[in-house]
Amino acid sequence: MTKILVIALGGTIGSVMTDSISLDKNSFKILDYVKDGSVEFSTLSPFAVLSENINTALWKKLIACIDNAKIAQYDGVIILHGSDTLSYTSALIGNAYPNEKIVLTAADRPLEDRESNGVKNFKSAVEIIKNKKISHPMTVYDGIFDAIAITGADVEDKFHAVLPAPTPLGKKIICDKNILIIKVYPGFDAKNYNFANADGVIFTMYHSATVPSGVKGALKMLDNQKIPYRFVTHRQSADYETAKDLEKIEFSTTIENAYISFILK
């Protein structure tokens, strides 16, 4: 008998469609759709939220829930999440529990919708635990990915992962830092920003690992205020002259992983 702990956090996979999509009173209704006599499910729910409202306080509750659950007694753990911030919590779990058999999954539509991918995703999560095909945190959403490596969904609601996957930190203490994420754009002007309340800044680079020259003005401001910053790219090198003089570039990573790295200690 395979023993799986299911941790429900809300999200579309735990929601219902009425006038709008809202949280269902039954956070574990996915178990009504999946009958497997070879699996014994246990359940926990430290909170229920639509994932766009996830924050560091809730992440701390999740970490405490996992730590207190004595997960070594289970063959694996499945976390039910919302898809909007699935990549952020995946990065958190990937860094905090690099050697644990934890799978995060979500749904694109409430389970009552026949076109929902929720049941399929959950069944896939169960199977990789049953078949012992997991040794570290994974994310299942229309595919199987390293949790620490996935990016947010694209315009077709598809998730992707960077390769090689980032190296996990093995840290899980969450700090309440105010991190500013800036997406570069044509005509970038540092005068549009006030960094006074920022504890750190992440700049997302263009797809070729480049940034506009106006970013250098922001770097001077950040250096003067002694605010740490970093550039993020999925690429493994920055080959254009516009990025040659930049320091603190994190290669082969995601915005989500860079953010989580900033707030963990």
Image (spheres, rainbow, N blue to C red):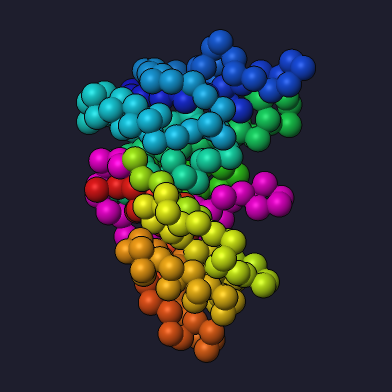
* Residue at the extreme bottom: 241
Please state the horizontal and vertical placement of residue 217, each as a whole percent of the image.
50, 74
Q: Which is more toward the observer, 237 or 117?
A: 237
Q: Is residue 113 above or below residue 56?
A: above
Q: Is residue 163 above or below residue 11?
A: below
Residue at x 36%, y 69% (from the top left corner) = 223
Residue 167 belongs to the span the image colors magenta: yes
Can you say whether 205 is above or below 126 in the image? below
**In the rendering, at what x and y percent does residue 56 appear?**
39, 36
Q: Is residue 105 magenta?
A: no
Q: Which residues are magenta?
A: 150-175
- Across and down, in percent, residue 43 comes to 39, 17
Q: Residue at x 43, y 20 (%)?
A: 47
Q: Residue 19 sits in which quadrant? A: top right
**Main secondary structure of the magenta stretch:** loop
- Residue occupying the point 53% across, 31% down: 53
Which residue is depicted at the point 40% across and 66% down?
A: 222
Q: Residue furthest right?
A: 19
Q: Position of residue 151 (x, y in %)?
A: 53, 53
